[in-house]
């Protein structure tokens, strides 16, 4: 009988070890860096791996690097939370109630915060689906509390849809997108008849830049401050747009890249969040992972992942790019 128990214990141990090894292999298989051009080789070493950091989220979004505390914060939109991750301390909760304080009068499953940015004062500014606004966190970054002041919540007397992503220019103007992803009925429950791209200028004037995109999403600005990039997360029109930035708004709207043919079961994800590297290259999440574009719209390479990637962010020194990828947090080391 004793030998039988010993045998069972050994078999259980082997089974657990196999499970652990399998899980580890699955975590290791979170993506690859594809090198097709010299520009990509200038950004990444050829033996670069996609690194698994954490998992267990409903839909991770809005990554933002906090330089002073050497950590990344990012949102979980359905869970209405912001998490934090650092090399020293790993993963932990940063803030609850990031997109709304109470759900008593709200309907929907994607009501948390989405895009995150810091303003010139070092305050956390966020797109809130539940609150249907762009808001600033009133508490400090070190002791966050769910107290917000609205920066933009309506246009011409009608509520915004559900602000999604945002970026500040060097002058302090705020650009953001407003698709209907936070509304239970999406287009059915909108107060506005369009999904807009906006500019909130330094005088708090809200300016509509584009009302023609079906699902405006990720937004970025070129290193010289002259071009605005906007992703459109529509499976039937999966594109990135570019605009010339002017003092009063934008002009010369043009197609930057069309990835519609890549959308499907094999390539998961849509044009979503994007960031501009100091080299001028655009890292844009899209079908199959992260697309890397030159400023002229040439595809210079990709970070391919088996899961959709919602957004990305660099640390201050651009040593890593962090990816919020469905239920996971990943990163890739840059040169």
Image: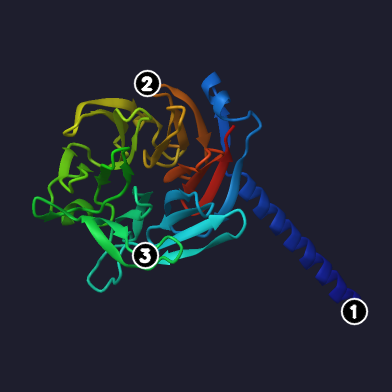
Dot 1 or dot 2, earlier in sequence: 1
In this rendering, the answer to whether 150 lies above or below 44 is below
Residue farthest to the front?
A: 121
Mark on residue 296? Answer: 2
Percent across and percent down for residue 89 are 60, 60
Query: Could you tell whether 295 is left or right of 209 in the image?
Result: right
In this rendering, the answer to whether 237 lies above or below 29 is above
Nearer to us in this view, 269 or 14? 269
Query: Could you tell whether 304 is left or right of 229 in the image?
Result: right
- Residue sitting at x 58%, y 44%: 30
- Residue sitting at x 29%, y 72%: 102
In this rendering, the answer to whether 238 lies above or below 121 is above
Nearer to us in this view, 21 or 57? 57
Give residue 335's quadrant in the image: top right
Q: Which residue is mark 3?
A: 139
Q: Quadrant of the N terminus?
A: bottom right
Distance Cα–Cα, label 3 vs label 2: 41 Å
- Residue sitting at x 55%, y 44%: 331
Q: Which residue is mark 1?
A: 2
Give residue 200's quadrant in the image: top left
Give residue 167's quadrant in the image: top left
Dot 3 or dot 1, earlier in sequence: 1
Q: Please indicate, yes or no, whether residue 306 appears anywhere in the rendered image.
A: no
Find out whether the residues at labels 3 and 1 contact each other: C-beta distance under 8 Å: no
């Amino acid at each position: 009988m004793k030998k039988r128990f010993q045998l069972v214990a050994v078999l259980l141990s082997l089974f657990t070890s196999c499970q652990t090894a399998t899980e580890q292999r699955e975590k290791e298989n979170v993506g690859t860096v594809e090198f097709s051009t010299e520009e990509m080789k200038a950004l990444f070493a050829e033996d670069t791996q996609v690194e698994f950091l954490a998992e267990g989220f409903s839909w991770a979004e809005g990554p933002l690097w906090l330089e002073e505390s050497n950590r990344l914060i990012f949102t979980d939109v359905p869970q209405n939370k912001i998490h934090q991750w650092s090399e020293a301390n790993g993963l932990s909760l940063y803030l609850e109630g990031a997109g709304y304080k109470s759900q008593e009068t709200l309907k929907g499953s994607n009501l948390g915060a989405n895009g995150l940015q810091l303003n010139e004062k070092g305050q956390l500014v966020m797109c809130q689906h539940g609150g249907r606004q762009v808001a600033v966190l009133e508490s400090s970054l070190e002791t966050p509390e769910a107290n917000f002041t609205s920066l933009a919540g309506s246009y011409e007397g009608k509520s915004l849809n559900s602000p999604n992503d945002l970026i500040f220019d060097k002058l302090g103007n705020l650009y953001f997108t407003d698709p209907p992803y936070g509304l239970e009925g999406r287009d059915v429950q909108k107060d506005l008849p369009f999904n807009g791209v906006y500019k909130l200028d330094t005088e708090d004037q809200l300016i509509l830049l584009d009302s023609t995109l079906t699902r405006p999403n990720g937004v970025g600005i070129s290193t010289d401050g002259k071009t605005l990039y906007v992703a459109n997360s529509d499976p039937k029109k999966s594109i990135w747009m570019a605009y010339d930035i002017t003092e009063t708004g934008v002009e010369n709207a043009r197609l930057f890249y069309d990835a519609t043919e890549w959308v499907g079961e094999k390539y998961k994800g849509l044009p979503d969040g994007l960031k501009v590297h100091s080299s001028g290259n655009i890292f844009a999440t899209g079908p199959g992972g992260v697309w890397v574009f030159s400023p002229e719209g040439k595809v210079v390479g990709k970070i391919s992942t088996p899961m959709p990637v919602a957004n990305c962010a660099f640390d201050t020194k651009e040593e890593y790019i962090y990816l919020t990828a469905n239920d996971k947090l990943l990163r890739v080391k840059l040169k």
